[in-house]
Image: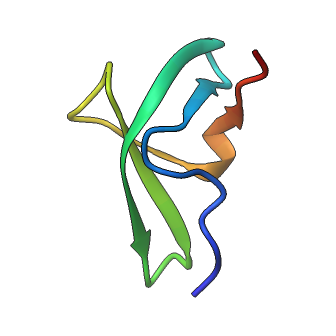
Amino acid sequence: MSISLFANGETVSIKASNEIVIIVKSHYVKNMKRYSYTVDKYPSTFFFEEELMKHES
């Protein structure tokens, strides 16, 4: 298992839209060997690490 790039409660940006969101939950997807993240503005959608980036304040 790898280490998650983002923590729950962390503010990040969605790369495609540059929208700022907060990570609500992270989950390791074992068969894909990467993490998925649920964010506050889109609770029914998940994002993978490569779709998010750290938000610089």
Whether 51 is drawn above or below 29: the answer is above
The answer to which image quadrant residue 2 occupies is bottom right
The answer to which image quadrant residue 24 occupies is top left
Mark count:
0
> Residue drawn at (71%, 25%), measured in percent from left and top?
55
Whether 57 is drawn above or below 52: the answer is above
| Along the viewing direction, whichever of 16 and 1 lies nearer the viewer | 1
The answer to which image quadrant residue 1 occupies is bottom right
| Along the viewing direction, whichever of 42 and 10 lies nearer the viewer | 10
Q: Is residue 57 left or right of residue 1?
A: right
Q: Is residue 21 left or right of residue 57?
A: left
> In x, y percent, where is residue 12?
60, 29
> Residue drawn at (64%, 74%), measured in percent from left and top?
3
> Residue drawn at (62%, 51%), measured in percent from left and top?
49
Whether 9 is drawn above or below 19: the answer is below
Q: Is residue 47 left or right of residue 54?
A: left
What scheme was used to colour the molecule? rainbow
**The C terminus - image quarter:** top right
> Residue drawn at (72%, 34%), measured in percent from left and top?
54
